[in-house]
Amino acid sequence: MSDRRLTPELLLGAYAAGVFPMAETRDASEIFWVDPERRGILPLDGFRMSRSLARRMRSGRFRATLDRSFPQVLDGCADRDETWINGTIRDLMLDLHALGPAHSFEVWEGEKLAGGMYGIALGGAFFGESMFSRVTDGSKMVLAAALDHLRRCGFTLFDTQFLTPHLASLGGVEITRAAYRARLARALADRASIDAIAMDGDLQAVVQRMTHTS
């Protein structure tokens, strides 16, 4: 059962303060707030693109979209043996998507969802919540497309919450809580908009831009 004492407004206030929610399991009735001592971020100009990933993105088999299938992406992220996305978090994210701050990035192979990621945009900060992959490099392709789009729209901070080995291999780094909050404050003061430009679904163009600027 979802805990409806929590509201979208409360959740946005928590993100703006550097805190985010998690649940112990899918079936947990409560959530807890997390404020890591060391925070994971991925510099918007620091994505590491391997040759094999670049080849896959240039193949012409895949395309990227923004906000085409938010519920499907949210459920794809939760579709694993262990997940922190419970009913409360799912409902709140759907509410935030309807209100505007929550967004999904998708990568498609034909009409098949190959990978997805969702998160929350506030000012010039994007809080990447979770991602999933259904084909080889699916999550890497969606992350590359998202970073490219966010950078072109004027975002300055991409928050990954924690630093996993997977994210570290793609350019993610850890910073202290104090350093993160300073970056967050600057990003929240920015007036970036995820709709500032249209999403470029051409992954070949994404590769060209990202490898040219790296």
Image: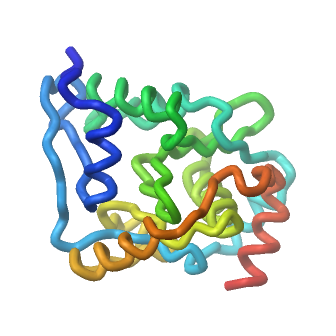
- Image: 78 above or below 54: above
Is residue 26 or residue 133 the one in the foreground? 26
Residue 40: image location, x then y, percent: 34, 69
- Image: 197 above or below 179: above
Q: Is residue 174 visible?
A: yes
- Image quadrant of residue 137? bottom right
Q: Is residue 115 left or right of residue 62?
A: left
Residue 4: image location, x then y, percent: 22, 21
* Residue drawn where x is 57% and y is 67% of the image: 155
- Image: 143 above or below 112: below
- Image quadrant of residue 154? bottom right
Q: Is residue 169 visible?
A: no
* Residue drawn where x is 30% and y is 63% of the image: 162
Q: Is residue 94 left or right of residue 15?
A: right
Residue 172: image location, x then y, percent: 43, 73
Is residue 186 or residue 20 the one in the foreground? 186
Residue 185: image location, x then y, percent: 36, 72
